Image (cartoon, rainbow, N blue to C red):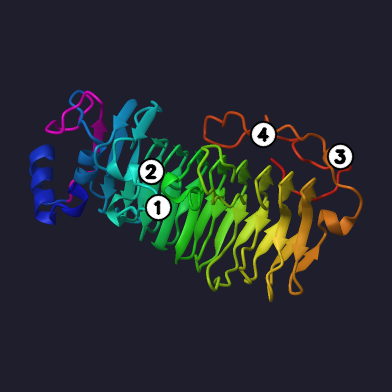
Amino acid sequence: MRNTAIRTAAAVGATLVTVLGPASGAAAAPTTLIVATNGNDTAPGTLAQPLRTIQRAVGLAKPGDTIAVRGGRYALTDNITITTSGTASQPITLGTYQGERVIVDGEQLPASHTPVGGSIPRAERGAIHQEASYWRISDLEIVNGPYGIYCDGCNGNVFARLKTHDNYESGFQLQGASGNNQILNLDSYGNRDPRKNGESADGLAIKEGSGTGNVVRGARLWNNVDDGYDAWKFTSPILVENTVAYGNGFNRWDFPDFAGDGNGFKLGGGSPAPAVAHTLRNTISFKNAAHGVTDNSNAGAMILNRNTTYGNAGTGFDADVSGGKATLTGNLSVADARAVAVGSGTVASGNSWNLGGTWNAASVLSTDPAAITGARGADGSLPSAPSFLVPRNGAAVGARF
């Protein structure tokens, strides 16, 4: 397969000379490579003569280059493999041409249909499989892959305005030695894993790795078979903010022996779970099959500030691990099966359960999610939802969107 036989640096150089022209004494100027469904991979990658596959453009791209993909559905027969890095000053950009809708479809990939009990070879994980740093990837819609995006050993990347849905594993997974990545305005939904009966397909998973500086902002993670967000066995702090998780953990696919967990935000895990000081702020978690937010045995000094949980089948804020050091401030639980579970080491102040009173649907201005689940702004920002789960009495608790 192509992704087990990466071309040598010499071959890449020869290809660039052929396509882009002979090198001068100075470094070549950044290039824009155009990809289109009616293109040809022997073409120069111009607007008039575009390339045919995203993989060909990825193979040609050098630091500072831009890959602009024209609208259409790109049906993969092998996953897109990214192994060449940009630099901090010259990242490589992969996005759409003038906002045209681009769908990367992994339905034909063999790993998308791994049988029950089977495992996906590492190199085949992801419709986009990335082991590279300093990329800017935006605006793609990634569907039906064995993971949508799988990024292992990735640093300094920005992933913006992506849609990862209906994949056969997690919509987006970041793992390994990966730091200083930004995941911005992601919509990840309807991801499932038939091979594991729902045990592991999350909307967004940052797991089984380490690396400081990772940020999740403006994501919506919904109707995934396992959890909305999962930080299983990631040993470095992650910031998650301005993010929404809902409807996760339900067996919409009629899997036998269903194993989905169904937490909105899972902030740890492992045997033993590492103690990590994740930060969760200004998030909403509602109508999930299990907890709204759970430490999942993470005893680290987590900070949970101004988050809202509503109507979850489990506990709104589950932070009761033995020896836990989490701090919960200004959070709101509305009509969860149980508002909170805290351990002896947890510090909780100014939360709805500390304020007392009854916190039910009548306590907030609106429980209608239509605003927060509506269309994003032109810049990818979340829609405004000024009334959704906002306390009717004006109390300064919970998230605001």
The residue at which mark 2 appears reads as 137
Q: Check if mark 1's residue and mark 4's residue have beta carbons within 8 Å.
A: no
Report the predominant secondary structure element of the magenta stretch: loop
Mark 2 vs 3: CB contact within 8 A = no
Q: Mark 3 points at which residue?
A: 392
Of labels 2 and 1, earlier in sequence is: 2
Eye-nearest disc, 3 or 4: 3
Q: Earlier in the sequence, mark 1 or mark 4?
A: 1
First in sequence: mark 3 or mark 4? 4
Marks 2 and 1 close (CB-CB < 8 Å): yes
SS category of the residue bearing label 4? loop
Q: What residue type is labelled 3?
A: Arg
Q: In the rendered image, which residue does mark 4 sit on?
A: 384
Residue 157 marker: 1
Examine the structure image and report whether residue 40 is included in the region drawn in magenta. yes
- In this rendering, position of residue 299 left or right of residue 398: left
The quadrant of the picture occupied by the C terminus is top right
Total marks shown come to: 4
